[in-house]
Amino acid sequence: MRRSGRAVAVVAVVALAAAPAIAVPLLASAALEEARLVVGPSADGTVSRVAQDGDTSAASTLTTCPALCEGNPQGERDAAVTFQINGLPRTAGVVEARLRLYSWQAFDAATTVHAGGQELDRAAGVTAGYNEWDVSRAVAGNGTYTFTVRQADYGSRIYWASAENKSPAIRPELVLSYKSDSAAPPSSPSPSAMPSPPVPAWRLAWADEFDGTALDAGAWVAKDNTSVDYDRACLTAAPDTVFVGGGMLTLRAQRRPATCGAEARGYTSAYLTTEGRKSFQYGRFEVRAKSPTGPEGSTGLWPAFWLRPDDGGHGEIDVVELPGGAQYHQAATQSIFYDYTPVKQDNRSPFPVGHAADGFHTYTTEWEPGVLRWYIDGVPVWQRDRTTTPWFDEVFTKPYHLRLNFQVGGWLGDPDAATRFPADFQVDYVRVWQR
Ligand SMILES: [Ca+2]
C-alpha cells in the first residue's frame, strides 16, 4: 500500500481521492466507489510490563522490547496506538485497514499486532521506514481502536516514531480502504468495534464558576505565608494574589521580595486546594483557563490544575500543567504519578493551533475505574489504563481533591530578566461531573 504523502495532525482525518477501482454497471443507481482514509493517532505511548516502570520520557518515540530485554526478565515493552475514526460514510464497508509505524533502522525482529486481546498480524522483520500490519479484522467502521505492537524477539529496544515526533511525515497512521455509496451522507460515529457496556451520561456534581467577588471558602483553601521546596515563590492568600471578579478567579505571580515562615523569596504566588472541602472518587474534571505562558516573557511560569489523594499517599492526576518559556509554551502536559521518586507517566500534547496564552482553553480529565482520558478543548489527547499502568488500581481507587496552583521556577527553569510580571493565571471555571 502506498504512503499517503500527507501530513496528518493529531485526530486529523484526510480522505484521499477516490479511485474507481471496481467495475460497476453503468446503470447502477448508486455507484460504489473505493476510497482511502488516513487517520492519525489520538493517543499513543509505550506500555511497560515492568511494575512501576514510568519510563515514558522520550515522547518522540514509542519503544518495544521483548521479554528478557536488557537483562530484565520482566522487561517487555509494547507500543500502543489509539485511533478515532469518524470520517467513514455511513454506507462504508472497510476493505482493508493497515497500521503503519515508522522505524529509523532495520531489525531482525518479529513483531505482532494485537487488539482486544487478539493477535491480528505478524511481521518477520522490521524494515527502515514505515512497517505495516493488517488490522482489517478489528476495524468495523467509525469508532475508537487501540492497537498494541509487541516485539517477539531481538534482545534490545526498537524505537518507532510517535505521534509527537517533530516530523509529521513519519508519525503513526491507520490507512483505511473502503467502498461506499458515493451518494450517501456521512454517518455519525458508530459504536466501537471493541464495545463497552452502555454507561450513564455525566451529571454535573460540583462547579465553581467564580461569579462572585470572593473565593468560596466552603470549597477552597489558599495556602498563606508558606512555601514549597519546588517553587521559588512565597505562597500567599493576599487579595492582590488570589482574587475573584468579572467571572474569573485570578492567581497572580509577582516578582517582589517576600518572607514566608523562615524563607526569604523573590516572588509571590498562589496555591489553592480543596483538601478537606471537596473530594471526588472518579469523575470528569475540567478547567477553563487562560495561562500567561505564551511564546515570550513566560520562562519560569508554571500554572497547573491537578488532583491529589485525600490520604496523602501515592498517586497524582495532573489534568494539565502549562510550563512557560520558548521551548515549552506550545504544548500542555498530562501526567500521572505513582510516587515522587518519581515513578510517573506523562505526555506532552501540542496545541493544534496557538498556545495556552492566546485565549481561554479547556483542559479535561475523565477518571473512571480502570481508565483516565485527557482532552484539550474537547479533543482527546492521551489515555492511561490498566494495560499502560501496572499501578493503576493501586493508586486511582480512592478519593482525590483538587488543586490549582501557579508555580514560579523549579526544575523546568527559573524566570529570567524577560519574564513578565505580574503574570496572571485566569480561571473561568472548574467543573466536576460524575456518572
Ligand atoms: Ca466564570
Image: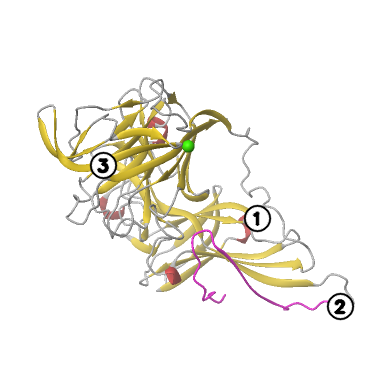
Q: Name the residue under label 2.
A: 25
The image shows residue 9, relative to residue 116, as above or below, that is below
Q: How many marks?
A: 3
Whether pointer 1 and pointer 3 mark residues with C-beta atoms closer than 8 Å, the reply is: no
Q: Where is residue 252 in the image (x, y as percent from the top left)?
A: 29, 40
- Confirm whether residue 53 shows in the render: no
Q: Mark 3 points at which residue?
A: 253
Q: Residues within 10 Å of mark 2 (few under 14, many from 20)?
A: few
Alpha-carbon span between mark 1 and mark 2 = 28 Å
Residue furthest toward the right? Answer: 27
**Looking at the image, which residue is at 64% across and 66% down?**
96
In the rendered structure, which segment of residues is drawn in magenta? 1-26
**Looking at the image, which residue is at 63% across and 48% down?**
192
Whether 20 is among the magenta residues is yes
Indicate yes or no: mark 3 CB to ligand 1 under 8 Å.
no
Reading the chain from its start, which is encountered first: label 1 or label 2? Answer: 2
Q: Which of marks 2 and 3 is in front?
A: 3
